[in-house]
Amino acid sequence: MLLVNPFKDKVFRMAKRLLVSTEEAEDATQEVLVKLWNKSESLVDYKSVEAVAMTMTKNYCLDQLKSKRASNMKIVHNNFTDREASLQQKVEDRDTWNWVEKIMNDLPEQQKLIVQMRDIEEMEFEEISKILEMNESAIRTALSRARKTIRENMIKTHHYGIG
């Protein structure tokens, strides 16, 4: 399991992002890790075991979502609020993050995934391209559109106080 330890948290975060439920994300992570373990001998040929794991996670979670007809996703990001920030700053940060989360929930599924992988998981475009089976320019375009939507909605929120 040393092969997957460095990125098992990324697998969990992606599963949590897609499935929302912590329990379901834990189950998904376990399923993916078991599949990886069972394929460990054939994985030597893969260039990036992490990319394979992320692809498996995406596919498993999307299958779970299709079977449930669930569509609401949740952003998981633990490092948003600075630990040394004042209480006022923490409240403002949490409020801002909640608005971003709400706006992201209204994005098309593909854009949600791309923002999650690029801006939250900080993955490279090449990795995202392999996982989503899209070309990099399409990913950049979708990311740009998603960021623009988020930015425009945040501007409206700050100007009017509500979204």
Image (tube, rainbow, N blue to C red):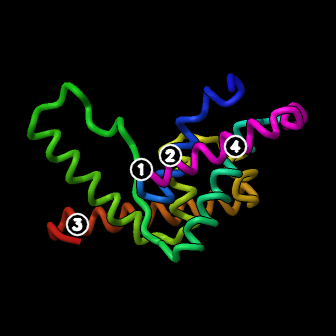
| Tag 1: amino acid | Thr
Q: Residue 157 carries which label?
A: 3
Q: Which of marks 3 and 4 is nearer the N terminus?
A: 4
Distance Cα–Cα, label 3 vs label 1: 29 Å
**Residue under pointer 1:** 22
> In x, y percent, where is residue 77?
39, 43
Instruction: Give the residues in magenta.
Output: 23-46
Lateral position of residue 135 relative to residue 122, left or right: right
**Chief secondary structure of the magenta span?**
helix
Three-letter code, disc 2: Glu
The residue lying at 55 percent from left, 58 percent from top is 113
For the residues bearing labels 1 and 2, Cβ distance under 8 angstroms: yes
Which part of the image, by quadrant, shows the C terminus? bottom left
Q: Mark 2 or mark 3, which has the lower sequence index?
A: 2
In this picture, residue 62 sits left or right of residue 90:
right
Q: Point out the tag, 3 or 1, that comes first from the N-terminus.
A: 1
Tag 1's secondary structure?
Answer: helix
Q: Which residue is drawn at 64% across and 51% down?
A: 57
Give the secondary structure at mark 3. helix
Left/right placement of residue 36 relative to residue 84 reads right
Q: Which of 77 and 70 is in front in this view?
A: 70
Disc nearer the start of the sequence (4/2): 2
Q: Does the magenta stretch include residue 121?
A: no
Tell me if 39 is positioned left or right of 153 in this view: right
What's the residue type where badge 4 is placed?
A: Ala
Q: How far apart are marks 1 and 2 (CA)?
A: 6 Å
- The numbered dot on residue 26 is 2
Q: Residues within 10 Å of mark 1 (few under 14, many from 20)?
A: some
- Residue lying farthest to the left in this orientation: 88
